[in-house]
Every structure is written in C-alpha cells, then in structure tokens.
Image (cartoon, rainbow, N blue to C red):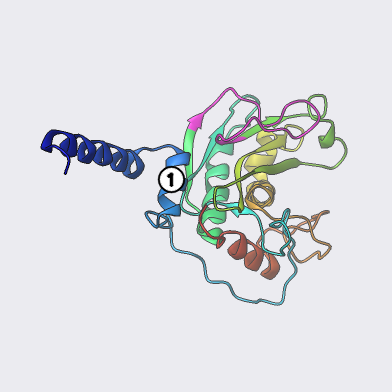
Amino acid sequence: MPRPSTAFSVVAAIALVAAAVLFHPSSQMEAVRRLVGLGGDRRLPAPAIVERGGVFAFALTQRGSSDPVGWDPCEAVEYAVNPAGMPAGARPLVERAVARISEATGLELVDDGDTDRRPFAGSRIRFGGPGPVVIGWGDASEYPELAGEVAGLGGAAPEDEASGRRHYVSGGIVLDTEAFTDVNVAERPRVMEAIVVHELAHVVGLDHVAEPMELMFSDNTGQLELGPGDREGLARVGSVPCG
C-alpha cells in the first residue's frame, strides 16, 4: 500500500493531465478529447440534406470513399480580409456572401479582422498550414489564373486528423480588381456578391459543374442564386463528421 503522500501526488498528477486534456485550446488536445469521447459538438446545427435533383461535385473526397472532405463543423472557420485593392462597398458584400454560405453549410464562419497576408502565393495556390481563410484582391500580374474572364479564385487545403479523416484547415480567395471595381460593386452588387459566394463554395469544398443552372457552373453568365445542386452539395460538405 503506497504512502498517503505518494498516492496524493499520483492523484494530483492525474488531475493535471485531465485538466490539460479538457481545457487546453490546441487542436491536438481537441483531437484527444474526441478520441476519448469528450467534446465534438457542432458549432451550429447541421443543415438538412435534401435530394433536390440538381448537380454538384466535391473538390476532394475522403481516401477510398465518395464522402466529401469538408471543414470540421465542431470548429469555427475563421476568415480574414486583406483590404489592399478592395473597392468601396465590398466589405458588406463579402459579409453577406459569408452569411449565405454559413446558412447553407451549417458552418460557423468567424471574421478574424483585417490582415496583410495575401490569399495565395505566386501563381500557384499554396497554403502555409492552418490559419484563417484569407480573402483579398489582385490582378493577373500577381495571379496569372485571373487572366481573361476569370473574376475570382478560391480553394482550401486539407490536413489529416487523428480520426483518420481529412478536414480543410486553411484556404483563400482572390478577387479580380478588374472585375471588382467601385462602379461594379455599386451598380451590380448582386453579381459581385454571387462571385464571392461561388468562390466561398470552393473554399468549403465544392467543385465546378457543367450545369448552367447551378452557381458552381464553371462559366457562370448570370446565375445569382444557389441552385438545387449547390444547396445539396453545400449541405453535404457542411455535414461531415467532426475531426
């Protein structure tokens, strides 16, 4: 039988470890909590998945499965705006687009404020590990993919979780300054907002489709609202299991 002082020390050590697991804010401890059956509550209610007869496609699927890769719905998805080149009136437009995607996915998108980070590095979409989704403005001289009629680029990068699933952990959107002008934002706000919604849909996990009635049509020529396939696809990427 151990001496009382030794037993007390062991109990105290166990209590400290338990407290670290329960309250430490790191993503690693969050993963540990889920492995032992603690935590794992969604930030917002899951959206209803309704088969609407539309067309949608996932940007990525889980390895060996048709299940989509999405953001962890038990974590807030933070985003930050780089205001360099931002046209007048664009901030409310971005906020409305964010709210529409949040409603469609059941993901909590949280404004992390302004940033000086660029959404993409060079001519390729690269991400430097977990961090806020960066929304910014640029042109084809910085982002060659914006050449021609392309008004925006968007995407996200996944990471393997302790559960064995993949979740997106960072992302970015760049909006073309030739399309996003003060005049266009003032006179065509719904069109500009639809472009941001389209790019945000890429960030949360949808790919282009070949159906003109969907907002995720690759050559959108006027669709302003989410189509039936868009809505079903967004509900599905927003309903993936927690990490």
Depth check, front residue: 172 or 176: 172
Apparent side of residue 46 relative to residue 166 in the rendered image (left or right)? left
Q: Give the range drawn in magenta.
A: 113-134
Judged from the image, the secondary structure of the residue bearing numbered disc 1 is helix
Residue at 57% in and 44% down: 93
Tag 1: Cα neighbours inside 10 Å, few (<14), some, or many (≥20)? many
Up-down relation of residue 185 to residue 243 (above or below): above
Residue 76, placed above or below residue 10:
below
Q: What residue is disc 1 on?
A: 30
Magenta-colored segment: predominant secondary structure: loop
Along the line of sight, which residue is nearer the eye, 115 or 15? 15
Q: Is residue 124 magenta?
A: yes
Is residue 57 within the magenta segment? no
Determine the image quadrant of residue 171: top right
Residue sticking out furthest to the front: 1
- Position of residue 48 measured from the top left corner of the image (x, y, whole percent): 53, 71
Q: Where is residue 98 in the image (x, y as percent from the top left)?
A: 55, 48
Indicate whether 89 appears above or below 114. Answer: below
The kind of residue tagged 1 is: Glu
Identified at 48% across, 31% down, the residue is 113
Counting the numbered discs, the total is: 1
